[in-house]
Image (tube, coloured by chain):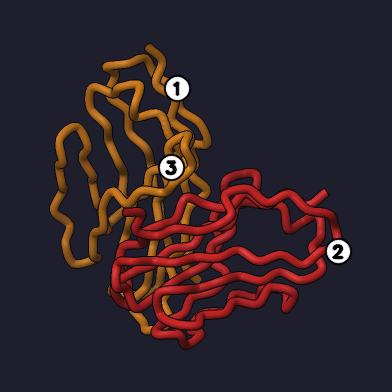
Chain colours: A red, B orange
């Protein structure tokens, strides 16, 4: 069983569209994250949730809206997609909130045309 | 501010050579954690090690070893007798000790092991 699963794996869309990426973890972890990896492989945190509560919001445009219906799920909705949004988006989870090791999903490669 | 620097963008060695990946960090926290992650060509990020700032003992796990030196703010990673399967991007990361702490990643080192 995949510990952290995210769908879809690939997402190709036009500028201006709205899209969502879903993430689920079956590890019983309390904390979930979204990271963005750009074309130069640089990884940057976007959001983190702990027990469905937003903990970290890293100066991300408000076109990005995370939603956590329960602590096992953290979805990412992106409105009005722009070319610069093209990247690989990783979902991750950890047992606790502080300094725990991260378990990553396999990533969603988003290409905005 | 916290920062992680991996000055080596790419390294290429021949199989069976030893290779060291450098990591230098900056933080004002007295308590912090350091990590290494591996990202193979398949793309998934895999946790390798976590070390807290109070534990300066070096660690060895099979062919992997880590050298943590607070005096130089470094947490270097050595692969002994490298293998083709070690080819990946390796990330060093840092996390401070607070409830809102986040893991800051370095820019990664792409390691290529040639047969």
The quarter of the picture where the N terminus of chain A appears is bottom left
| Of the pair B45 and A59, the residue shown nearer to us | B45
| Relative image position of residue A101 (x, y in whole percent) | 31, 62
The extreme bottom residue here reads A53
C-beta proximity under 8 Å, tags 3 and 1: no
Mark 3 nearby-residue class (10 Å; few <14, some 14–19, many ≥20): many
What's the chain of the residue with tag 2? A
Looking at the rendered image, the disc whose residue lies closer to the viewer, 1 or 2, is 2
Residue toward you, B7 or A97 = A97
Q: Chain of mark 1?
A: B
Q: Which residue is mark 3?
A: B39
Q: Are marks 2 and 3 on the same chain?
A: no
Q: Is residue A42 above or below residue A76?
A: above
Which of label 3 and label 1 is nearer to you?
3
Disc 3 versus disc 1: distance between alpha carbons?
Answer: 16 Å
**Which residue lies under the disc numbered 1?**
B12
Decide if residue B22 is on the left or right side of residue B1.
left
Binning the other alpha carbons within 10 Å of mark 2 as few (below 14), some (14 to 19) or many (20 upward) gives some
How many numbered marks appear?
3
Q: Are marks 1 and 2 on the same chain?
A: no
- Between marks 1 and 2, how big is the CA–CA gap? 41 Å
Q: Residue at x 44, y 58 (%)?
A: A5
Q: Residue at x 32, y 28 (%)?
A: B19
Q: N-terminal of the two: label 3 or label 1?
A: 1
How many angstroms separate mark 2 from mark 3 (CA)? Answer: 31 Å
Q: Chain of mark 3?
A: B
Local SS, label 3: strand
Q: Is B32 or A95 nearer to us in this picture? A: A95
- Element under disc 1: strand
Residue at numbered disc 2: A16
Q: Residue furthest top?
A: B115
């Amino acid at each position: 069983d995949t510990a952290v699963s995210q769908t879809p794996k690939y997402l190709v869309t036009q500028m201006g569209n709205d899209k969502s990426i879903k993430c689920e973890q079956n590890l019983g972890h309390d904390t979930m994250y979204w990271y963005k990896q750009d074309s130069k492989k640089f990884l940057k945190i976007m959001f983190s949730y702990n027990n469905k509560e937003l903990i970290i919001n890293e100066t991300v445009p408000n076109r990005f809206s995370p939603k956590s219906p329960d602590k096992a799920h953290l979805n990412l909705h992106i409105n009005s997609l722009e070319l610069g949004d093209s990247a690989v988006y990783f979902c991750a989870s950890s047992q606790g909130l502080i300094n725990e090791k991260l378990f990553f999903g396999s990533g969603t490669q988003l290409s905005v045309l | 501010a916290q920062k992680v620097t991996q000055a080596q963008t790419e390294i290429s060695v021949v199989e069976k050579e030893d290779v060291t990946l450098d990591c230098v960090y900056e933080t004002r926290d007295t308590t912090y954690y350091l990590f290494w992650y591996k990202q193979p060509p398949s793309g998934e990020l895999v946790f390798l090690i976590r070390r807290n700032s109070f534990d300066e003992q070096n660690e060895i796990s099979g062919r992997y070893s880590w050298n943590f030196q607070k005096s130089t703010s470094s947490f270097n990673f050595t692969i002994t007798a490298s293998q083709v399967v070690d080819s990946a991007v390796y990330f060093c990361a840092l996390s401070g000790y607070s409830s809102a702490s986040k893991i800051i990643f370095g820019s990664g080192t792409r390691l290529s092991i040639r047969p």
